Amino acid sequence: MNKTRVLVVDDEAPLRDLLPRFLLSLGITDTMIAADGNEALHLLGQYQFDLLITDIEMPGATGLQVMIAARNQNLKIKMVAMSGKMKDTQFAETVQAVGPDAMLAKPFNMTVFLSTVRSLLIGT
């Protein structure tokens, strides 16, 4: 998995800093971070990513808009959507309609996060 390129998008600095460290434990060293949806859209226009991990509610472009752009640019990209509102059924259905490969309700623990990422990247 060490050749995997990941984009982490979250407006919360602590999570934005922590997730790349979690990914290191899987041998993933090529991780870029974006502090909001607009920055993510810019990076998606410049680089190819294997995995997108994005918050949904952020300033500027939303995580939904980021996922749509990512899928339009790369049909094979794996996507993880994160939000504190994921337990709201209507919200979760809206997110699911965009087509993420996995959805995580914040807060989540490292074991759940790593298991999710590992399962998505097997075979890539």
Image (tube, grey):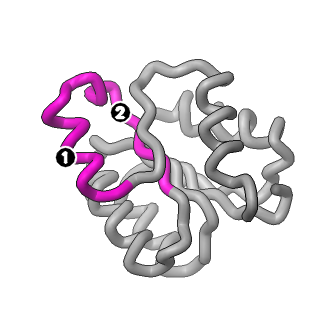
Answer yes or no: is residue 9 visible: no
- Residue where numbered disc 1 is placed: 94
Q: Residues within 10 Å of mark 2 (few under 14, many from 20)?
A: many
How far apart in space, not on screen, are marks 1 and 2 (Cα)? 12 Å
Q: Amino acid at mark 1?
A: Thr
**Label 1: how many Cα within 10 Å (few below 14, some 14–19, many 20+):** few
Residue at image point 70% right, 63% down: 5
Q: Name the one closer to the observer, 75 or 36.
A: 75
Query: Could you say which disc has been placed on residue 47 in the image?
Result: none
Q: Is residue 124 left or right of residue 117?
A: right
- Answer above or below: position of 62 versus 43: above
Q: Secondary structure at mark 1?
A: helix
State whether residue 97 is above or below residue 85. Answer: below
In-image side of 76 versus 122 (left or right): left
Please tell me which residue lies in front, 117 or 84.
Answer: 117
Going 20% across and 25% down the picture, which residue do you hit?
A: 88
Residue 69: % across, % down: 36, 72
- The residue that mark 2 highlights is 83
The residue at 82%/65% (across/down) is 3
Q: What residue lies at 63% left-to-right and 65% top-to-bottom? A: 50
- Closest to the observer: 94 or 20? 94
41 displayed left or right of 61? right
Q: How many marks?
A: 2
Above or below — where is 75 with respect to 59?
Answer: below
Quadrant containing the C terminus in the rendered view: bottom right
The magenta stretch spans which residues? 79-99
* Circle 2: residue type: Ser
